[in-house]
Image: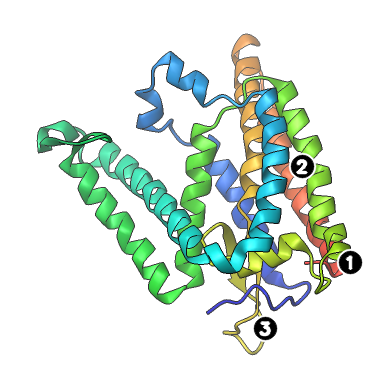
Amino acid sequence: MCDPSQLYGFDLNMLVMFGMAVLIVYVAFHTPELMIVLDMSQEELEETEFKSSQALLFFFGASFMLLGLYLLMDYIMIILTLWVTFGATVAISILIQEVLGRNFVKDQKSLGTFRVPCIGNFNYFDVVCFAMGSCFSIGWLVTKNWVLNNILGTCMALLFLKTLRLNKLMPGVILLSLLFFYDIFWVFYSSRFTTGGQSVMVAVASRLEAPIKLMMPHITIDYPTSTCSMLGLGDIVIPGIFIGFLVRFGRIVTVSSNGGYSGYGTYAIVTYAASLLCCGLFLVLFKSA
């Protein structure tokens, strides 16, 4: 059992988690497009595009949801855990289907299809992949193992990064600017308004038992230990969406310059890694998370 509520300070596992975050972002944009994305119509692709109005709604919606979770956590814990776990099951099932479908089962429709009322058509390969994904989710629900937690969280982060798109610069600038102040307030200053003096962000992330964060036990001479560090998936997905925009833009520049090197994607990922290190440094110095 890995308990992120037992804050510890700096440890080498923070560097490992930061490395995992950078690797997730890199893999998301240096692997082929998902088949479900390639099968989307133009209208469906436009629905996955992140717009400026959605950036504003996300900022206020995330703040209200975080506060609501903090106040109502004891009442909705089980429902929220099951809901997130189901989402993680769908994510890992899609990625399993992607890997197996590209390499082993290329003609999936030949396996037979059936229709689920009010949902849509499925083939039996979908069922097999969902069953395989469910094994990971059920295993995590039973054991709360941090490795299974990280597998589910990684799959959700990859699915978000490979489906959500940022096609214009301004929505990304607005989103990251607003979330800069969002993190500062909810991590560092919200403790001034809570009865226990604990950060709202830390309280929700540590108490919510759902694969919405990466966790790793501290690397000490007493390993294995129950104390661990955590990194929320939002710290991977939100910057990752902007990095994805820069990666795609860099590829366009490369093509238009007749093969000349464009380092937008590389510089973005390196900057993201440096930002994670700075974040970890300040969290240790201020002892806030």
Quarter of the image where one finds residue 125: top left
Q: Is mark 2 on a helix, strand or loop?
A: helix
Q: Of circles 3 and 2, which is in front?
A: 2
Q: In this view, does 144 lie above or below 46?
A: below
- Amino acid carrying label 2: it is Leu
In x, y percent, where is residue 32? 43, 32
Q: Is residue 252 above or below residue 86?
A: above
- Amino acid carrying label 1: it is Phe
What scheme was used to colour the molecule?
Answer: rainbow
- Amino acid carrying label 3: it is Thr
The reply to whether callout 1 and callout 2 are in contact (CB within 8 Å) is no
Quarter of the image where one finds residue 243: top right
Horizontal side of 159 relative to 248 (left or right) equals left
Q: Say if residue 230 shows up in the picture.
A: no
* Circle 1 residue: 286
Q: Is residue 166 above or below residue 103?
A: above
Q: In this view, does 256 lie above or below 136?
A: above
Say whether disc 3 or disc 2 marks the residue closer to the N-terminus: 2
In x, y percent, where is residue 25? 59, 43
The residue that appears at 60% across and 84% down in the rendered structure is 225
